[in-house]
Image (cartoon, grey):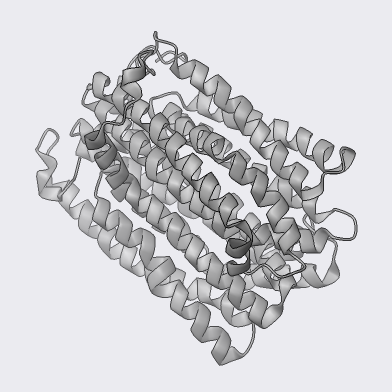
C-alpha cells in the first residue's frame, strides 16, 4: 500500500494480524496519546495562571460535560462513517465508500453549526446546570464560547481524521494529530501569557490548530487520484438519507456512550460541589485528564483494530477477526495495568504537573487512587465494546457503552456519598461500576467468540445478527 492512499489496503485481509496491529495501532496510539496530551496542555498552562490557576482548572472542568456532548455528536457521524468505509473497502464497494465520506462532511458541518447555535444562545444557564459557581463561571464561559464558535471545525477535523485511518493510511492520521498537538503546545503559552488572553487564549489556540490540520485533510480528500476521495460535484454533498441512517445507527453506540458520559460528569460535578466545593470539581478535572491519557492509548489500540476487524468481517475472514480482538484486548489490559501502577504508587507526582496548590494537590492525588482501584479491567471492557461496534452489532455495542455509566455508575454517585457523608463516595463509585460492567462484558464477549468459532471463512455472517 502506498502512503498517498492510491492503492486498496488488501493487506488487511492477508498480512499477519500481529504485524497489522503494529502497523495500524502504533500510529493510532501515538495519535491518541498526542491527542490526550493536546487536551492536557490547556489544563497544565491554565493551572499555572497567576492567582487564579485553581479556579481556572475548576472552570475548565465545568466545561467537560458540554464538550462531551460535542464529542458525542461528532462520533455519531464520524465513527459510523469510518466503520462503514472499512467494511465497504473489504467488500470492494469503493463508489459507496466515497458517498459515505461525502455524507460525513455534510452531516458534520450541519451538526457542528447546530451545536454552536444552541450553546451560544444558552451558555450561562447550561454552565450553571453543569455545576458552575459565581467563582468558576467566568472562566468556563470564556473557554467554552470560543470552543463553541469553532465546533464545526472540530467535528470535521476529528471525523475526517478517523476516516483517513480507516481507509488504510494511519501514518497520515497520526502525523496530522502530532502536528495539531505540537502547534497547540507552541500557541498556548503565546495566547495565554504573552497576549494575556488567559483561558480564552487557550481555546483560540485549540481551534486554530484544528483548523490548520483540517485544511490539509480536506486537501488530501479532494485529491481525485486517491481511491477514497471527495467528489468535485456539489450534488454529491447532498445528504443520502439511507447512508446517513446506516452510518448514524453504527455511530449510535459511541454517541450514547459519550452522551452518557456527559450526563454522568454533570452529576459528578454537582455531587462534588455539594460534598467538596469548587476545588473538588477541579480535582476531578485533573484526575480526568490523567486517566484520559491511558484511556486514549487504549482507544489508539481500538482505532488500530477497527479497520482490521471491519475489513476482515466484511471479507468473511472470521478467524482473523477473533485473532485481532484477542491480541488487542491483551495489549489494552497491559496499558491499563501500567496506568494503575502510576495512579496507585505515584499519584502526587502525576498530579503535580497541573497545580502547586496544596489543597487541590491533596484532593487530586487521593481521588486518583480511589477512582482507579480496578483500572486494569477497563482496557478489556473498552476493546470488547469497540469490537461489537466494528462488526455493526449496534444494540450490543450500545448496551455495553451505557451499562457502566448509566446503569451502575450513576446510582452509585448518589448513594455512596450520602452513606459516607463525604466526597469519597463519589470517587469509590467508579471501581464498583467498573467491576460490574467488566463481568457483563466478559459474558457477552465469550458468547460472540463462540459464535465466531462456529463460522468457517466465507460463511454468511447473518447468524450473528450483524446489521452490516
- Left or right: 193, with 214 as reference point: right
> Image point 74% across, 37% down: which residue?
185
> Image point 62% across, 90% down: which residue?
421
Q: Looking at the picture, does residue 208 appear above or below residue 133?
A: above
Q: Looking at the picture, does residue 403 appear above or below residue 329?
A: below
Q: Looking at the picture, does residue 18 appear above or below residue 346?
A: above
Frontmost residue, 435 versus 77: 77
Name the quadrant of the C terminus.
Answer: top left
Name the quadrant of the N terminus.
Answer: top left
| Place of residue 442 in the rendered image (x, y in percent of width and height, measured from the top left) | 32, 63
How many marks the image carries: the answer is 0
| Place of residue 221 in the rendered image (x, y in percent of width and height, measured from the top left) | 44, 18
Frontmost residue, 231 versus 447: 231
Looking at the image, which residue sits at the far top?
A: 225
Which picture quadrant has residue 214?
A: top right
Q: Can residue 282 be seen here?
A: yes
> Image point 77% across, 72% down: which residue?
362
Which picture quadrant has residue 36?
A: top right
Q: Looking at the picture, does residue 311 appear above or below residue 9?
A: below
Amino acid at each position: 500500500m502506498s502512503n498517498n492512499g492510491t492503492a486498496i489496503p488488501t493487506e488487511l485481509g492477508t498480512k499477519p494480524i500481529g504485524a497489522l496491529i503494529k502497523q495500524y495501532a502504533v500510529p493510532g496510539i501515538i495519535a491518541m496519546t498526542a491527542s490526550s496530551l493536546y487536551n492536557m496542555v490547556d489544563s497544565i498552562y491554565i493551572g499555572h495562571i497567576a492567582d487564579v490557576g485553581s479556579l481556572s482548572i475548576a472552570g475548565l472542568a465545568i466545561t467537560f460535560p458540554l464538550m462531551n456532548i460535542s464529542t458525542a455528536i461528532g462520533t455519531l457521524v464520524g465513527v459510523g462513517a469510518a466503520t462503514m468505509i472499512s467494511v465497504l473497502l473489504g467488500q470492494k464497494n469503493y463508489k459507496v465508500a466515497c458517498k459515505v465520506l461525502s455524507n460525513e462532511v455534510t452531516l458534520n458541518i450541519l451538526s457542528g453549526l447546530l451545536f454552536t447555535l444552541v450553546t451560544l444562545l444558552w451558555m450561562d444557564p447550561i454552565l450553571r446546570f453543569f455545576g458552575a459557581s459565581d467563582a468558576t463561571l467566568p472562566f468556563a464561559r470564556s473557554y467554552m464560547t470560543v470552543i463553541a464558535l469553532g465546533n464545526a471545525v472540530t467535528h470535521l477535523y476529528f471525523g475526517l481524521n478517523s476516516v483517513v485511518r480507516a481507509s488504510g493510511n494511519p501514518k497520515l492520521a497520526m502525523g496530522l494529530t502530532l502536528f495539531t498537538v505540537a502547534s497547540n503546545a507552541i500557541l498556548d503559552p503565546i495566547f495565554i501569557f504573552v497576549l494575556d488572553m488567559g483561558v480564552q487564549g487557550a481555546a483560540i489556540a485549540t481551534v486554530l490548530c484544528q483548523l490548520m490540520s483540517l485544511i490539509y485533510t480536506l486537501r488530501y480528500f479532494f485529491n481525485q487520484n486517491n481511491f477514497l476521495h471527495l467528489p468535485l460535484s456539489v450534488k454529491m454533498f447532498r445528504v443520502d438519507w439511507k447512508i446517513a441512517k446506516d452510518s448514524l445507527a453504527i455511530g449510535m453506540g459511541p454517541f450514547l456512550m459519550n452522551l452518557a458520559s456527559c450526563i454522568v460528569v454533570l452529576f459528578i460535578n454537582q455531587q462534588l460541589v455539594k460534598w467538596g466545593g469548587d476545588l473538588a470539581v477541579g480535582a476531578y478535572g485533573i484526575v480526568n485528564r490523567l486517566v484520559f491519557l491511558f484511556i486514549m492509548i487504549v482507544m489508539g489500540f481500538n482505532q488500530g483494530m477497527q479497520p482490521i476487524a471491519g475489513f476482515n468481517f466484511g471479507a468473511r475472514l472470521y478467524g482473523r477477526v477473533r485473532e485481532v480482538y484477542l491480541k488487542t484486548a491483551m495489549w489494552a489490559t497491559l496499558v491499563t495495568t501500567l496506568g494503575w501502577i502510576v495512579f496507585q504508587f505515584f499519584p502526587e507526582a502525576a498530579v503535580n504537573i497541573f497545580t502547586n496548590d496544596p489543597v487541590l494537590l491533596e484532593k487530586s492525588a487521593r481521588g486518583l487512587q480511589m477512582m482507579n482501584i480496578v483500572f486494569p479491567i477497563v482496557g478489556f471492557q473498552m476493546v470488547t465494546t469497540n469490537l461489537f461496534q466494528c462488526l455493526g452489532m449496534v444494540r450490543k455495542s450500545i448496551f455495553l457503552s451505557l451499562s457502566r455509566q448509566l446503569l451502575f455508575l450513576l446510582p452509585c454517585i448518589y448513594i455512596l456519598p450520602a452513606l459516607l457523608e463525604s466526597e469519597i463516595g463519589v470517587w469509590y463509585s467508579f471501581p464498583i461500576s467498573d467491576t460490574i460492567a467488566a463481568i457483563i462484558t466478559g459474558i457477552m464477549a465469550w458468547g460472540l467468540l463462540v459464535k465466531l468459532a462456529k463460522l468457517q471463512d466465507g460463511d454468511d455472517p447473518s447468524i450473528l445478527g450483524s446489521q452490516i
